[in-house]
Amino acid sequence: MIGENLLGPEPTLLAPEPEVSAALAAGTDPETVVREFPESPLAWVELADAAAAEGREIEAYAFARVGYHRGLDRLRKSGWRGAGPVPWSHEPNRGVLRALYALRRGAIAIGETGEVERLTDFLVGADPEAIAAIEA
């Protein structure tokens, strides 16, 4: 426990999105899932990832930006105050963390350097292992 900030905020643990996860696991097109669950960062990041895989960089960035904002909404509703751990190990947090990563990837693709740095700091602050886990 040496070195741990005992006064820091508790980790934010988001509620699961079982309907979204089930639809995506069943192979439902991400656009269909977004239309049914537009508040879901997980649905938006799946759409961003699909666009990025097809080389549609601007669309991928835009979809990731929406996922990022939906993620911030979910974090705030769960008590997050703008800082503190958002552990990758808690599976329902992964949609938000992936949306942050997808937005960072999109910012790299369009040369938005300041955004890349800010999002890298955000991800590392949320969970220092998140980037490596997403890239694995």
Image (cartoon, helix red, strand yellow):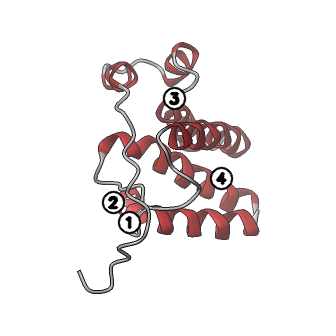
Relative vertical location of residue 52 with respect to residue 121 in this rendering, above or below: above
On the image, the x and y values in percent for residue 133 come to 34, 60
* Point 70% across, 37% down: residue: 59
Image coordinates of residue 29 in percent, x first then y, are: 47, 20
Q: Earlier in the sequence, mark 3 or mark 2?
A: 3
How many residues crowd around disc 4 within 10 Å: few (fewer than 14), some, or many (20 or more)?
many
Q: Nearer the viewer, residue 9 or 48?
A: 9
Do labels 1 and 2 touch, CB within 8 Å? yes
Question: Can you tell which quarter of the image residue 35 is in?
Answer: top right
Q: Amino acid at mark 1?
A: Ala
Q: Label 3, label 4: how many angstroms apart (C-alpha)? A: 19 Å
Dot 3: within a 10 Å radius of its alpha carbon, few (fewer than 14), some, or many (20 or more) residues? many
Q: Is residue 56 left or right of residue 20?
A: right
Amino acid at pointer 3: Ser
At x 38%, y 66%, the residue is 132
Q: Which mark is residue 136?
A: 2
Look at the picture and state if 119 lies above or below 57. Answer: below
Image position, residue 128 (x, y; %):
41, 70
**Residue type marked 2:** Ala
Instruction: List x then y, in percent, for residue 85.
Output: 42, 60
Q: Which quarter of the rendering shows the C terminus?
A: bottom left
Q: Secondary structure at mark 1?
A: helix
The residue nearer to you, when weighing 127 against 81, is: 81
What crowding class fits label 2: few (fewer than 14 Cα within 10 Å), some (14-19), or many (20 or more)?
few
Question: Which numbered disc covers residue 106?
Answer: 4
* Residue linked to disc 3: 40
Dot 4: element: helix
Q: Which residue is mark 1?
A: 132
